[in-house]
Amino acid sequence: MTIPVQDLLRIADVEAVCGYAILALRGVSLCVPEGSIVALLGANGAGKTTTLKAVSNLLGASRGAVVKGEITYRGEPTLRLDPADLVRRGVVQVLEGRHCFPHLTVEENLLSGGFARRPSGRELKGDLERIYDIFPRIKPRRDAKAGLLSGGEQQMAAIGRGLMSRPKLVLLDEPSMGLAPNDRRGDLRNRSTVEPG
């Protein structure tokens, strides 16, 4: 006998507008089963960011709204929930564009992601070390202002801040923006001579 996997997230026939007038989504439906990874692919302007903001209830910040359809998280309708309530329930969105607090240090940025669940100091410390294990490049920069980091390091800090809340559902918008697939600068620094081309 197979036990059905519960959908963590279900989007059913959603339509959304931006600027209170522009139809940005029409008839979007998808399911995210618990424990799965789902990717939204499409051209610029296809509605990927709008879909994620609809799930997080962040459309209102850009004068947008879901006007039709339903979004449920763990079987519960979400459209009337405050974005902060969704975070407390385990839904975290890492926005496109490396949104860090530039005047706070890397560590202060990370810690700000953990406060919503009101952890003990010991839990916060353990969570910080877990994030530094995932993103070792930002550990030596923990006391640097986030605004002074490279784009890739800021993206790591932004994703790390989201993970500090121990989410059940992580919505990553353009997660690889600014991340280099292979940092060859170390190779160049370690060369004692330059070979002729």
Image (cartoon, rainbow, N blue to C red):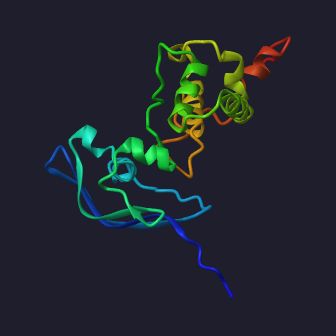
Q: Nearer the viewer, residue 15 or 152?
A: 15
Residue drawn 45% across and 29% down?
A: 99
Q: How many marks?
A: 0
Task: Tell me the quarter of the picture where residue 62 sits.
Answer: top left
Placement of 158 over or under 188, stated as above or below: below
Placement of 112 over or under 43, stated as above or below: above
Q: Nearer the viewer, residue 141 or 177?
A: 141
On the question of residue 197 being in view, the answer is no
Residue drawn 65% across and 30% down?
A: 124
Placement of 137 over or under 16, stated as above or below: above
Q: Where is residue 84? Give x, y as percent.
A: 40, 41
Asked if residue 22 lies left or right of residue 49, the reply is left
Asked if residue 3 lies left or right of residue 89, the reply is right
What residue occupies the far bottom of the structure in this picture? 1
On the question of residue 16 being in view, the answer is yes
Q: Where is residue 86? Give x, y as percent.
A: 43, 48
Tell me the quadrant of the picture where the N terminus can be found. bottom right
Residue drawn 52% across and 27% down?
A: 112
Residue drawn 72% across and 32% down?
A: 126
What residue occupies the far right of the structure in this picture? 192
Q: Where is residue 111? Give x, y as percent.
A: 58, 26
Asked if residue 181 lies left or right of residue 42, the reply is right
Placement of 33 over or under 65, stated as above or below: below
Q: Where is residue 135? Give x, y as percent.
A: 69, 32
Asked if residue 110 lies left or right of residue 197, the reply is left
Tell me the quadrant of the picture where the C terminus can be found. top right
